[in-house]
Image (spheres, rainbow, N blue to C red):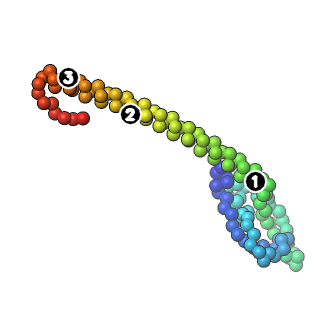
Amino acid sequence: LDEVLGIYPHYFRYNGLGGHPRSDRLELGVIAQEVEKSSPRLVNKFKEKLSPEDSTQTELKKVNYSLLRFLTMNGIKEFFTKWKNGEDQKAQDLALLERKIASLEKSRKIILEERKMLKEKSGKRLVKWC
């Protein structure tokens, strides 16, 4: 999940370098250098001439989109599991709080009844505190 959270989509146009034809339309994808920071296993490095006229090859980076799909699916599953477990824990916490409230209400009722009995026995007015 942490790997997926570090990946952000971007719109871009291919510049015609590194074996990709120049594109006039906007493409949607991820940037290999950014992906590499959070998930290096998704990035393949290779050497290629930036343009056919170049005499030397340059190291380029390419995102493995097939592996990215699987990583994303696993991230969604992990997120769902964490969310579901969190919901279950919230339900347990709520049930515990409801039991505590019921217990406190029962204790309050007992205290008020005892106070009433004491008041009747003593014939005096007691200080109101609950």
Q: Nearer the viewer, residue 14 or 52?
A: 14
Residue 85 falls in image quadrant: top right
For label 3, count other residues whose C-alpha is less than 10 Å away and answer few (under 14), some (14-19) or many (20+).
few
Residue that badge 1 annotates: 69
Number of the front mark, 3 or 2: 3
Residue that badge 2 annotates: 101
Number of the front mark, 1 or 3: 3
The percent coordinates of residue 3 (x first, y second) are 67, 53
Q: Are marks 1 and 3 in contact (CB under 8 Å)?
A: no
Q: Residue at x 70, y 59 (%)?
A: 35
Res. 3 in view: yes
Looking at numbered disc 2 in the image, what kind of residue is underneath it? Ile
Looking at numbered disc 1 in the image, what kind of residue is underneath it? Arg
For label 2, count other residues whose C-alpha is less than 10 Å away and answer few (under 14), some (14-19) or many (20+).
few
Residue that badge 3 annotates: 117
Q: Is residue 53 above or below residue 36?
A: below
Q: How far is mark 2 from mark 1, CA to CA?
A: 48 Å
The percent coordinates of residue 42 (x first, y second) are 75, 55
The percent coordinates of residue 110 (x first, y second) are 29, 25
Q: Is residue 111 above or below residue 11?
A: above
Mark earlier in primary sequence (2, 1) = 1
Q: Residue at x 13, y 30 (%)?
A: 125
Q: How far is mark 3 from mark 2, CA to CA?
A: 24 Å
